[in-house]
Structures are given as structure tokens and as C-alpha cells.
Amino acid sequence: MKTRLLAAAICLIAVATASANQVQTATELANRLDARLAAKVRFVCAPDTIDYFTLDNAPDGRITITANNANSMAVALNHYLKNYCHTTVSWYAEIPVELPRVLPPVDSAERVTARVRDRFFLNYCTFGYTMTFWQWNHWERFIDWMALNGINLPLAITGQEAVWMKVWQKLGMKPDEIRAYFTGPAYLPWHRMANIDAWCGPLPQHWIDTQVELQKRIVARERQLNMRPVLPAYAGHVPLRIKELYPKADIKPLEVWDEFPKPYNTYFLDSEDPLYAKIQKMFITEQTRLFGTDHIYGIDPFNEMSPPSFEPEYLARVSRHIYQSLRAADPDAVWLQMAWFLYYQRKDWTPERTRAMLQAVPQGKMALLDYYCERMEVWRMRESFFGQPFIWCYLGNFGGATAMQGNVLEAGARLEAALDSAGTNLTGIGSTLEGLDVQQFPYEYILDKAWSNMPDDSTYIARLARRHAGNESLPARTAWWALARDVFVHTPYTRGPQFNFVPQMDKHPRWGRDLIYYRPDRMVQAWLTLLQQPEITRDAMTIDLIAASREVLGLAFAKAKQRFDRAYHKRDLDQLRRQGKLMLSIIADADTLTAHHPYCSITTWIRQARDYGNTPQLKDYYEMNARRLITTWGGDLDDYANRSWAGLIGQYYYKRYEKYIADVTACVEQGKEFDQADFERRLMEYQLAWATDTTPINATPSPNLLHFARHLAVKYAAMLP
């Protein structure tokens, strides 16, 4: 009897300690946002088998939040912030939380439950397009933002190069060989996905050492907040040097990715080869030593690449052996796989081939991320992934393009239909955005649907408008409903205003096929409605106004560009000069406009890159990586990651169009034909020189954003639909 009582007492103490830790974690999060929140809100942990939270007013004037863990407490805190304090927490570290002078009570007691078990966030690409040069202060706010939005499955791939350094050295490679195999830091996502090797490398040891320490802090904080970090595992990618060291290993070259030349192509070790399981074991052991494990691993062997064979038997063997190697390293392992390849190469991945790959893994030991559901729900095409668990994901952004994009409300309706009909193997909701951009609305809207208190769309948008405006603003409410209904209607591969792309006579650029995918007159009307506000007091509304204004400037520019090209064909020199001057004026105004927010300016991106280095040489190297990714990229991806950022607009896009206008005008003056191919060859020399330059870039805003935007409305009124 005494033994049983002692065991029960120990168990009670353990539960009480765990609950106290959850409360402390949530309180610390609230304090990081604002000390007044930590004083206003009292957290209580009451464990349950499901994620839930309650809010109520306490007799002492505080708000009581009761929940099953710190993650649910964070969601409850965000619910209070959004719906009672009417504020939006930015995912950027430098943006403070804007709170009312008096923190209000709640209207009445509420209980909210999670509709799904899993809430996933991030994309391999986000670690390049946004997070490359983040330090701990950036990650700390972002992890808090993920907790506030209920994320419990974050992708966590930082720092893995330190693990690979150990593995490849044990297999006979020298440190310099390994660093030369890695790409530069901005390109590591595509190296990790086996798309490219060595590009913009070699990777400095400074990067490897600092990233491993950063990852330790990232996963520790994520676990504190009841997240299960999704760590990487071995997918088959090997350095060419391994083929030389192990000539009997079954290593084959993968196909060329996006026209990268041979020195940057990648190699794949067949999963049936004994060396594969050996590498997997070495990698998982070293990674677990450094970062621990939650037993869920991202493995994507053929992302945007064709496997050596599409025979179903081969695909089943590859899949089976990958899982077996993972299980041998971690008996509790679950394989998490992007289903992007089933969309991107859907003609190749037939139902028979897909079934062979997925069913070769025991049921429940592989989970799929249905990556781009706002465009195509693969689960509907492939029999709900043949019973394997999956997470419905909204992508919303390619290349980190800074445009108003994403068919948000339609995606919400699709998600509701999936929750109603997909069955029990739909276990979660997620977002797989490639870049954070500056507008959080689409991603928060989708993640809010993971909880039972989601209002109808019109109510949701009205509350959003109030948060962004800081008050009940009819212009904000009217404009935001128009934007949500009529502008956020499509997720293209990548887009931006036409001046963001290499100038082409008579054509939209390759990545700009969907430059305008909404009715321009409705975009303009929503913008003009935003301009009716008496003042801009909130950071979120600053971003809204910049985003809407640059969309409209893009519409005006497209019209001027069309007139310019027509004038060339008509040999109308006066019209050519007039429209050329107008085009450059629009680009200059876009530069001034975007300078009004630090995250709409290239100076923030470059400052992060240079701050990461600890020597002048490293600072220059990191800046080169930062500049190239968003401009020339590599292969045939020029402008894929374009940004409508101050400084980049004024000093890069402006110069390109200045050269285009000068060349075309000179052709008309001299009676010559414009040579597009020759122009682009010469332009590439300028672009590559710019990408390796380290001259400081300046961007100057006008004194008042709202006044400047109203000035633009008058200046370009005759050009607007």
C-alpha cells in the first residue's frame, strides 16, 4: 500500500511540475510580446486528450486562459489579442505589438477546440528566400508567432550541414571538399533537396558553426512550446567524391535541374545499396546527438527530379528501403514527405506509380504534405494518398514574391470541404509558403481554420480590417472585403509588377504570365477606398497601403510599357520618349513608396546578410549570396525571386529599364531593329556586376505615406481603369 501511495504521489508531483512548466512557458511568451500582457493574463494548465483552450474573466480583473498545454495557451492568447485588443502580432522581430492603452476583459466565457491534430508550417525554400540570415532574435519572434497560430509541426532544417560535415568526413572526404560540395547559404534549400551542388559556394566554416548553435536554440524553444520539430533525414543525395571513394556503390547522376550546368548537377545513391543504410544511420545518430529528435523526419528523394526509373516495382523498392534505413536508425521514425512532386510531375506520377511508392511504407509510418491545395488537391487525384495520413496545405507564395496573391477565400472553402469529406487520414492543416513576404493575412486565415471558433468570411475580414486600421474604419473594412473577394484570387508561380522583370519587347516575362489575374478596376477601387482613411497608425495598415499602391503602380506601368512598345513599331519617336519617361517615373515612385517600411526595402535583407558575417570578407560573401538569390538566381531562374523592395526597385530594376528605353529609342533614331537577344546578353553583364557589388543601397521615403499615396492617385489618375 505504501509503495502504491508513494508512486501515486510521485506521479502527482510530476504532473504538477509539467503543468507549472507549461504555465511558465506561456507566461514567458506573453512577456516577450509585452510585459502588460503577462500581468493581465493568468494561465492555467489542465491536460486533456485534445488541444483546447478556454477564456474567462477572473475576479481580480485578469483574464484566465485554461488550456491543455503551452501551445494551446498561446493560441488562446492570440485569440484575445486579435478579437479583444484588436491587434496583429507581426512575425518580424523588429515590429512591436500594438496594444490598447487599457487591456479589455473578454465578453463572455469561451471554449475552443482544435479541429485537427497536426498544424504544419514552412517550406524548404523559406529557409533561403526569407530566413537565410536570421539570427536568434528573428527566430525567437517567429517561433512565438508560430505558437500563437497553433503550429505544432514546424519544419526545422537549420544547421544540418554540421551533421553532414561529420558524416562525409567519416566516409573519407576532406573538410575543404565537403564545403565545396555545399552551395552558398542562400542556396542551401535547393542543395538539401538535391537540386544543385556547389553553386555560390564553398560554404564557409563560420556559417556551419554558427548555424548548428542556432538550431540548438530553435528546436529547444519549439519543444518548450509543444511543437515537434520536423528534422531532416537522408534522402539519397551524395557528393560526386563519394562515387570516387566508393566505386562499387550504386550512384547515378540525377537529371539537370533548371538548366544548371554540369559542375552543379547532383548524384543519387540507390536506397538498396548497403551504403545508403550506413549513411542514414550515421546521419540520424549525429543529428540526434546535436539536436535530439521527435521521431518525425522530412525525406524528399525526387523533388522536381525524375527518379532513375519510373517502374512501379523500382519505386516501391526505393521507398521500402528508405523507410527501412530510417527505422533501423530510429525505430519510432515517421517519414514526412512533400507531395509537391505528385503535383509538379503529375503526368509522370501515375496512380499506379504513386500507389507503389506510398504503400511500400507501413500504414501510418509515412505522412504526406498536400502542398498546393489552393490550386490542386492531390489527395482527390490519388485516392486520398491510398490511406496514408496527410496534411492539407496552402502554399500562397512562390519565390517570396511581394505581391498581393493567393486565392484565400476559395482556399478556405476548399479546406472546409476537405475537412468534411476527406476522411480520418486527413490529420492536419498547414502552410508551405516559399517566402514570408510582408502580408500575414492569408496564412493566419488558413491556420485559424484549425480551431472551432472560426467565424464566417465576412466577419473574419471585418475583424481583420479593424485590427489593421486600429479602429472601426469603414474605408478599411470596405477596402479589405474588396481585396479579399476580388484581388486575392490566385496563386501563380511567381509574380510582381512588370518592372520587376527583365524587359522584353511585346511580351510579358516568363515568370510574369499571371502579372494581372484580377479585374484591375476592382484593385484600383479598393486602393482608392483605403486612401479615404484619415490617418495610418498601425504597422499592418502601412503594409496594406504599400502593397495596394504598388499593385496599382504596376497596372499603370504595364499600360505605359504597352504604349512604349507600340510606339517602337510605329517608329513614333515623340511617343516613345514620352512613355519612356513615364515608365521611369512610375518605377521611381514605386521606390519611394516602398521605402516607407523596413520589410519593403532591400536594406533590411542586405543588413541581415552583412550582420551575419564577422569579417569584411564574410560580410561581402554573404551579401553576394543575398543579392544573387533575388536577382539573377542561377540556371534559368532569373527574376524568379523578384521583390518589390525599395532600393532594389530604384537601383536595379530602374537601371534595367533605363537601358531598355535607351536601346529601343536609339534603334528608332538610327533606323535599326531592336535585338532582344543582344540586349539580354549585355544586360546580364550588368546584372552579375550588380550582384557582386557591395556599394551601400539607399532608399528614401516621402515624409508621409498616406499623403504620398494620395499624390500618386492624382498623378496617375488618367492611366487607371
Image (cartoon, helix red, strand yellow):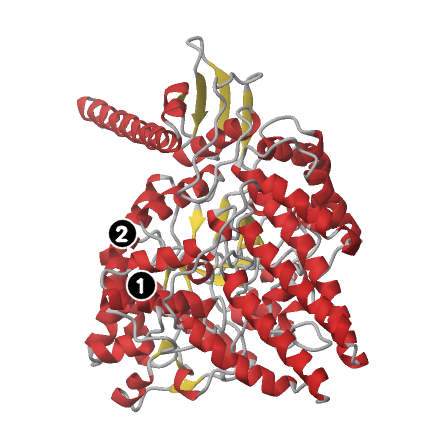
Q: Which mark is residue 216?
A: 2
At mark 2, the secondary structure is helix
Q: Residue at x 53, y 61 (%)?
A: 650
Judge by depth and name the residue closer to the eye, 294 or 640: 640
Q: Is residue 257 left or right of residue 29?
A: right
Q: Residue at x 37, y 86 (%)?
A: 250
Callout 1 touching callout 2 (CB < 8 Å): no
Question: Whole-percent x and y of residue 10?
Answer: 22, 27
Question: Whole-percent x and y of residue 116?
Answer: 54, 42
Report how many numbered discs are placed on residues in the image.
2
Q: Quadrant of residue 34?
A: top left
The reply to whether residue 378 is visible in this rendering is no
The reply to whether residue 275 is visible in this rendering is yes
At mark 1, the secondary structure is helix
Q: Residue at x 55, y 72 (%)?
A: 356
**Looking at the image, residue 615 lies above or below residue 39:** below
Q: Which mark is residue 160?
A: 1
Marks 1/2: CA–CA distance: 11 Å
**Looking at the image, residue 584 lies above or below residue 598:** below
Density class for disc 1 (Cα within 10 Å; few <14, some 14-19, many ≥20) is many
Under mark 1, the amino acid is: Gln
Q: Residue at x 33, y 33 (%)?
A: 25
| Quarter of the figure with the N terminus | top left
Judge by depth and name the residue closer to the eye, 651 or 446: 651
Question: Whole-percent x and y of residue 595?
Answer: 51, 50
Q: Quadrant of residue 629?
A: bottom left
